[in-house]
Image (cartoon, helix red, strand yellow):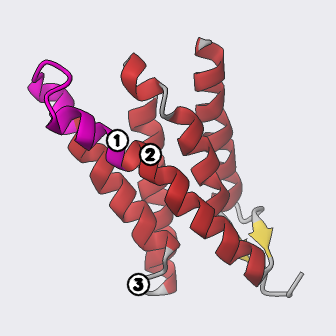
Amino acid sequence: MLPLFYGALLIGAWLLVRDITGRSLASHASTRLRRRVAVVAAAGPGIAPVIYFGTRSNGGAPALSVLGVGYLLFYILFALGLLELMPSDAARFARRAGYAGLLVLGALPSWGLLYLTPFTAVAAAGLVQEDASGG
């Protein structure tokens, strides 16, 4: 079971590298759809830890609350980049930085958080640039 979750992180990391190197291109319509899917998929890891830690279901461990806030902040950064609510270069940086943060937090050794990694892998669909050539 463990390889499945870490495999999801590796897939996400691979897709992030493809985006950074400019090898992840899609049409305008496909880019919009992928980014919408990514916002929804990333909401799982972005919001679930805050709900979990905020309800004290974890026994009130304060260090884990910091992780929940971290997930939320990286999700917000990622979502702002996906929705392009800022200039293009800043949105690209926000997308990549927010996603990288979600990957790093997902790699921390915690069974509760590790279950969220498949959502993080699906969210990598939003790491795509619009193909300027129209193809």
The residue that disc 2 covers is 44
Q: Is residue 34 above or below residue 65?
A: below
What kind of residue is marked 2?
Answer: Gly
Which quadrant of the structure image shows residue 26?
A: bottom right
Q: Is residue 88 left or right of residue 53?
A: right
Q: Is residue 87 magenta?
A: no
Label 1 close to label 2 by CB (< 8 Å): yes
Residue 110 location, x and y as percent?
37, 19
Residue 109: tell me if it is visible.
no
Residue 53 location, x and y as percent?
20, 33
In the image, the segment drawn in magenta is 47-66
Between disc 3 and disc 2, whose residue precedes?
A: 2
The residue that disc 1 covers is 48
The Cα–Cα distance between marks 3 and 1, rounded to whole angstroms, is 26 Å
Residue 91 location, x and y as percent?
47, 76
Q: Name the foreground residue: 130 vs 46.
A: 46
Q: Is residue 133 left or right of residue 9?
A: right
The residue that disc 3 covers is 86
- Which of the two discs, 3 and 1, sits closer to the camera? 1
What kind of residue is marked 1?
Answer: Ala
Residue 90: tell me if it is visible.
yes
Q: Is residue 11 left or right of residue 117?
A: right
Q: At x 48% / y 40%, what residue is drawn?
A: 103
Q: Secondary structure at mark 3?
A: loop
Q: Secondary structure at mark 2?
A: helix
Q: Name the foreground residue: 99 vs 90.
A: 99
